Amino acid sequence: MLGEAIDELNAACDPVRDRAFVLWHKEWHHGILGIVASRLTDRYARPVILLSVDGDTAKGSGRSIRGFNLYDALAALPTRPKQFGGHELAAGLTIDTASLDDFRRDFRDYAGSRLTEEDCVPCLDVDCEIEPDELTLDAVQGLSLLEPTGMGNPEPVFFLRQLVIRSISPIGNNRHTRMKLERAGCTLSCVYFGKNPAELGLGEGDSVDIAANAQINDFRGRNVQLVLREARLSAVERLRDADSRALYSRFHAGDPLTADERRMLCPNRPELVAIWRYLASQSGGQPLTVDPVWLYRELRRVSRYPLSLGKLLLSLDVFSELGLLAVEPDGDRLRIALIPGAPKADLNNSAILASLR
């Protein structure tokens, strides 16, 4: 249902300019509309209303962001629901199906007049930064004293820096992720719901910062488990990638590079072969849409070659230049399509590689 809602959002709304979303469908189960609306609100940092249509009536749930009172918004709209109730951050409503288009327009316009671009940047409140060895069974069990958690008393969110991913794998039919993170000999078991490893853009060996809830897992023993709310490459990793991308951009702009910079950017033949073989093995005749940061790190892990973000981007340019594939930007990702039946190419014919040697 979340996937269907995202498809509908992209088709019926403007994910960048709209400050609020109203979506509906005949087959959406009313009982989980609030859960999916909450997921969309977290992802897009905008108020979201989802409705299940049944004949002449649509019933649904809405979730909001801090600073936008959902109940007051519903009460102020020119096209008001037949029935509604709730509070600042959540509401339920019933509306005539014939009014849905007008309701979407009015709700979008109301939000647009009250929310700025800065209001719609996803953010996560963290309660405190901790060290891995502080997450003992006794300490995490003690968090039960704070229960019940929920609206007005959220579950504590902890921040940990520079943990190394020792293992990462998809679970739940490739919908979620399990990880083992380590620092200074302390290993943490983690799960991330709603994204697989490719969507996270993370791989083994990466250094990451995380925000997470801490829980006790009683499955096959009793241990601490972190439920990740967000995970990102650590500052050191992000700086290295930014420098590599900047070097690649300078080359494309025609800026002069030093001999060392050219060596840092230019892939050798074994690296190019490894990248091509990986792409060919993963495509299955269909285009790949991937995060380039995740892709180069996955290639580095699989091939054991010292690849960088700049090397990967330049390699894709070389393959495109030789007529082997086509690359298009897709938001923060790249859509890579291998060209069927393309003849073998001689890397010596690449003007891009020649300019770096």
Image (cartoon, helix red, strand yellow):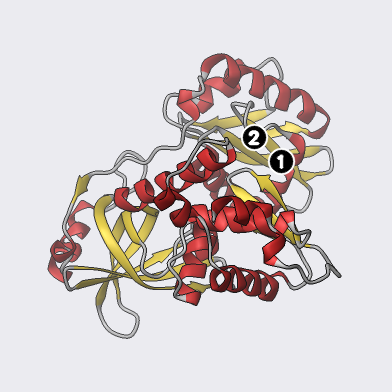
Q: Secondary structure at mark 2?
A: loop
Q: Residue at x 49, y 38 (%)?
A: 256
Q: Label 1: few (<14), some or many (≥20) within 10 Å?
A: few
At label 1, the amino acid type is Asn
Q: Quadrant of residue 175?
A: bottom right
Q: Residue at x 58, y 21 (%)?
A: 111
Q: Residue at x 58, y 45 (%)?
A: 332
Taking the image as shown, residue 221 lies to the left or right of residue 356, namely: left
Specify which label sits upstream in the sequence, 2 or 1.
1
Give the residue number, with chain letter if any, for mark 2.
15
User: Total of numbered circles in the picture?
Assistant: 2
| Nearer to the camera, 182 or 263 | 263
- Residue contact between numbered discs 2 and 1, judged by CB atoms under 8 Å: yes
Q: Whole-percent x and y of residue 70?
A: 52, 27
The circle on residue 28 is none
| Nearer to the camera, 152 or 262 | 262
| Nearer to the camera, 264 or 126 | 264
Q: Quadrant of the C terminus?
A: bottom right
Q: Whole-percent x and y of residue 234?
A: 32, 52
Above or below residue 55? Residue 100 is above
Q: Whole-percent x and y of residue 340?
A: 84, 67
Q: Label 2: few (<14), some or many (≥20) within 10 Å?
A: some
Q: Whole-percent x and y of residue 297?
A: 47, 64
Q: Secondary structure at mark 1?
A: helix
Above or below residue 75? Residue 345 is below
Q: Disc 2 and disc 1: Cα gap in Å?
A: 7 Å
Q: Quadrant of the N terminus?
A: bottom right
Above or below residue 271? Residue 329 is above
At label 2, the amino acid type is Pro
Give the residue number, with chain letter if any, for mark 1.
10
Specify whether residue 2 is in view. no
| Nearer to the camera, 121 or 38 | 121
